[in-house]
Image (cartoon, rainbow, N blue to C red):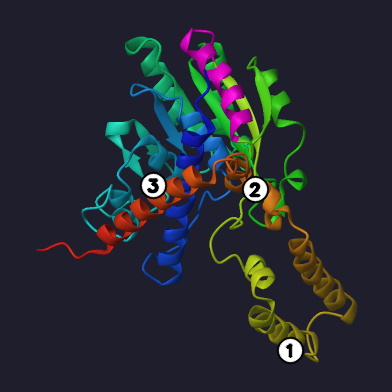
Amino acid sequence: MPPELWSLYALMLESRLSEEAIAALWHDGLISGEMHLGTGEEAIIAGIVSQLRKSDAMALDHRGTAALLMRGVDPVLILRELLGYPDGLCGGMGGHMHLFSKEHLAASSGIVGAAGPTATGFALSAQYSYPGAIAVAFFGEGAMNQGMLMESLNLASVWNLPVLFVCKDDGWAITTRSERVTGGDLSERARGLGIPAVKVDGCDVSEVWEASHAAIERARSGQGPTFLHARCVHFEAHFLGFQLSRIVRHPFREMPRIAVPLTHSFLQPRGAALGERVAGLKKVLAAVLSTFRDPRRDSANDPVRRARKSLLSDPVRLQELEDQIEQETNRALASALAEVPS
């Protein structure tokens, strides 16, 4: 039986609030380097992780925070890791792209496609040592163009391994539409290797749960891997601070920062021919305009909001749940920011 939507919404909301807190820390300069968040992936992660057992393993990509939180990893340890403290989850050495938890059989990597061989290795171990256990690989659609992931799909098929390959497809390869750099249908690629493939709306947690439940039970019973192709939206684009997203959110503040140098370059007496400059300017303007129409700006694609709408019939319980999760998130944040006595 599927879990009630309340429990799934709780997982999704905890993840969203935690990642919003992480974003605030990053914008305040307390977290260094790039920051890739999974805001928009919550329905995919919750629908699958909520079904995992202690003996199951997860191989994550560079957006692993949500999966680790939903798996039960201490949020304070994750936050301390992102802040670079030695008492963080990985001793402050992994950062957000290389989070590991041996206790939870979870490993992430910033290498695109690495979740494939990691999950396949987990699954091979489970097949020999932990009958009934499975492995899950989470990755983006760009990873499907990496040889190691395709090899992993092939091995999982040939060896009949208990793996669920989860493709979180947001339609973007950083700043390029995925359709421009990826040929064919991804589900057909998996089927071509003998792996059943299922397409789901990655913004609908109930649909994800149902589809993944069948795939997980199939793997547990020794019937091999499944490929789950889930469409989603990344509300923070590829990473925090993505310039086009900043322009859309704060046009009056951000546009001058690109308009002035563009105008200066356009009016330079030397350089490319006028026609080439006009063509380049048109590309920049087209990118900005397409971002204004981007589905990332449509609240209907927000999985947390969509799940919440189904719970509005009990506003008192909903408010109590949201208050509780917000308080827990704030406590974790306060603990993470507290100085540890030397």
Residue 61 seen in render: no
99 with respect to 205 (left or right): left
Badge 1 element: helix
Q: Magenta stretch: dominant SS?
A: helix
Name the residue tied to disc 1: 264
| Mark 3 or mark 2, earlier in chain | 3
State the image quarter where residue 262 is shown: bottom right
Badge number at residue 235: none
User: What segment carries the magenta color?
Assistant: 205-224
Name the residue tied to disc 2: 233
Q: Is residue 251 above or below residue 267?
A: above
Amino acid of disc 1: His
Q: Position of residue 309 (x, y in %)?
A: 63, 44
| Mark 1 or mark 3, earlier in chain | 3
Q: Is residue 141 above or below residue 329?
A: above
Amino acid of disc 3: His
Q: Nearer the viewer, mark 1 or mark 3?
A: 3
Calculate the distance from the C-alpha at mark 3 to the C-alpha at mark 2.
22 Å
Q: Nearer the viewer, mark 1 or mark 2?
A: 2
